[in-house]
Image (spheres, grey):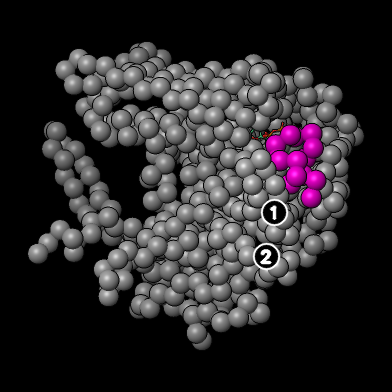
Amino acid sequence: MAPYPTANSSGLNTPESELESVLPVHPTAARRPNPIVVQSEQTAYSDEYITSSFTNRGAAVTVTDGQYLVTPTAQQYELQTARKVAKTGLMMVGWGGNNGTTLSATILANRHNIVWHTKSGVQQPNYIGSLLRASTVRLGSDPSTGKDVHVPVSDVLPMVHPNDLVLGGWDISGARMDEAMKRAQVLDWDLQRQVMPHMAALGKPLPSIYYPDFIAANQEARADHVVPGKDKQAHLEQLRADIRRFKAEHALDRAVIFWTANTERYSDIIPGVNDTADALLASIKASHSEVSPSTLFAVAAILEGEPFVNGAPQNTFVPGVIQLAERHKSFIGGDDLKSGQTKLKSVLAEFLVNAGIKPLSIASYNHLGNNDGHNLSAEPQFKSKEISKSSVVDDMVEANHLLFKRPEPGAVKGTKAAKGEHPDHIVVIKYVPAVGDSKRAIDEYYSEIFCGGRSTINIFNECEDSLLATPLILDLTILTELLTRVKYRDVSAGQAEFSPLYSVLSLLSYMLKAPLVKPGTDVVNSLNRQRNALETFMKACIGLEGSSDLLMETRIW
Ligand code: NAD
C-alpha cells in the first residue's frame, strides 16, 4: 500500500468541494493532495492507520542536600492515527453570537469562494490566524541545498478542512443566522450582503437552556428562544437528543460541541453536588440550582461520546464533569479562547523572565463594546474572566527562583511568603459600546533591570475580537477531531492494546487562556512551549523526532 493515494476519491482525505474550484483559493484555504510521507522504520502506513514508534526522552531529577541528581529517562511508545478524517459537525452553543455568526459566515465565504470589496480593494476569504491552516513547521532540510523545508501544519497529518465542517448549534436568541450576523456588526457589508442567502439557509439555532442566574441580567432581552421548564434532567435529555438528531440528519461521524455562548458566573463547588460524577448526575436529576447551562451541555456531550470544548472562562468543568469524562473516555478541553492580550502576555512575560529581567507589575486594561463586553460588565461574569486571565504568568515566574522567591514551606497559609513572590498583576475590563467588536487592550509591563534600574513597556493593542477568535475555534475543533483519531500504546510498560488519549485534551492549550490539564499535572502557559508540544506530538505521530533547534551541522567543522 502506498503511503497515500494519489487522488482524493478514496475517502481517505477530506473530499474536495465542487464550489471551491471556480476561482483560485487563498493558500490557507487550499487543499493539497499530497500530504507528507515519512520513509523510516519508525513509521508504517496501512489503509486505515499511520503507526509510528517514538521515544519520549526526559530526565528524573532529585535534590538531596542541595545536590541535583539527574537520570536521563526514555519511554517507548507507539502512536496510531486513523487516516480517515471523520465527517465532522461543529455544534456551537451561542451560535447566534458574534463568534458563532462570524465563524459561519467566513466558512461559507471560503466554501463558496466569495470575494468582496472593502475601501482598500478586493478581499479574498482566507484562514489567516489559524495555526493549523496558516502556519508552518520545519520538517528538515533539503540535502542538495542545505536549506530548511517548511510545510503547512495542516499537511502533517490528515485533518478535516474547515470548509467541510457541518455547522449547527443552539442559542437563547431566536434570530435567524443572517439576522444574527447583521446584529453582530463584525463583517464588511459587502461580504454580509453576499453571504446573506447562505446564512439564511442555515436557519435558526436550536432553542437553548437559559438559567438567568448564570449570565448577566442585561442579556435577558435576548432570551426569546429557550427550552421551556425548569427540569434539568429533561433539559439534559433534550440536548442529547439534539446532538443525536444533528448527527443523523447530516450523516456525521463526529460532532464537536463548542461553548461560545456568554461567559457565565463561576459555579460553587459543593461537596455532594458537583464534586463527583455521581453527585453531579444526581444533582441534574434533582434540578439543583448550582448546575450551570454550560455544565449541562458538557454532560450531554460526554454522555453522547462527543467532545466538548469550552471557549469561555467559567468553571464548566467542575470536578464531577472531569470524572464523568474519564469514566466515559470522552474528550473535553478548555477554558477560554486566547485571542489577544493574554496571548501576547504569555509571550512577553516569558521573554522578560527568560531574559533574566524581573517583571514587578503587569497592569492590563481592556475596553470593548460588543455583547460579550456588555455581559462582562456585570461583576460575577467579569470575575470569571479575571480568574482566567490572571494565572497566565504563574508558571514562568515559578520556573525562575533566582528572580522570584519560592513559597516558604511552613509559612502561614494565605500570606505572601506561603504563596511565593509574584509580580503585581491586575486586569480591568470596561464596556464602551461605541467601539463595538474592536477591542482595545492596554498593557504596562514594569520591570526591574540591572543594578536597580527600571524598564517600562507599554502596549496598545487594537483588534477585532471575533476575527481573532474565529480561527481559534476552527483550530480547536479540527485539532479535537484529530486527537479523537490518535491512539497510543506504552511499549515500555508492555501495554498490548492501543488506548485513546486521556480525556482532558491539554494539547489544545495554545488556543486557550486558562488551559485545563490532567488533574495533578502542571499547567504550561508559555505560548512557545505549548506550540512546541503540539508540533512534537504531531511529528511523533508520523515517526519524526522533536523540533530540534540544535542545528548541529551548523555548529561543527
Ligand atoms: P456574544 O455575546 O456575541 O455571543 C454569545 C451568544 O451566546 C449570544 O448570541 C447569546 O444569545 C448566546 N447565549 C447565552 N447563553 C446561552 C445559552 N445558555 N445557550 C445558548 N446560547 C446562549 O459573544 P461572543 O463575542 O461571540 O463571545 C462568545 C464567548 O466567547 C464569550 O463568553 C466570550 O467571553 C468568549 N471569548 C471571546 C473571545 C473573543 O475574542 N471574541 C475571546 C475569549 C473568549
Which stretch is magenta? Answer: 181-194
Where residue 357 appears, x then y in whole percent? 26, 26
Q: Quadrant of residue 468?
A: top right
Quarter holding the C terminus? bottom left
Q: Disc 2 marks which amino acid?
A: Leu
Q: Residue furthest left?
A: 557
Q: Disc 1 marks which amino acid?
A: Val
- Mark 2, residue position: 23
* Residue 300 visible in the picture: no
Most frequent secondary structure within the magenta stretch: helix
- Mark 1, residue position: 115
Where residue 28 appears, x then y in whole percent? 56, 58
How far, Cα to Cα, is label 2 from label 1? 10 Å
Label 1: state its secondary structure. Answer: loop
Q: Is residue 136 magenta?
A: no
Q: Quadrant of residue 551?
A: bottom left
Nearer the observer, 73 or 467: 467
> Which residue does the image show at 20% across and 52% down from the upper left?
71
Identify whether 258 is placed above or below 48. Answer: above
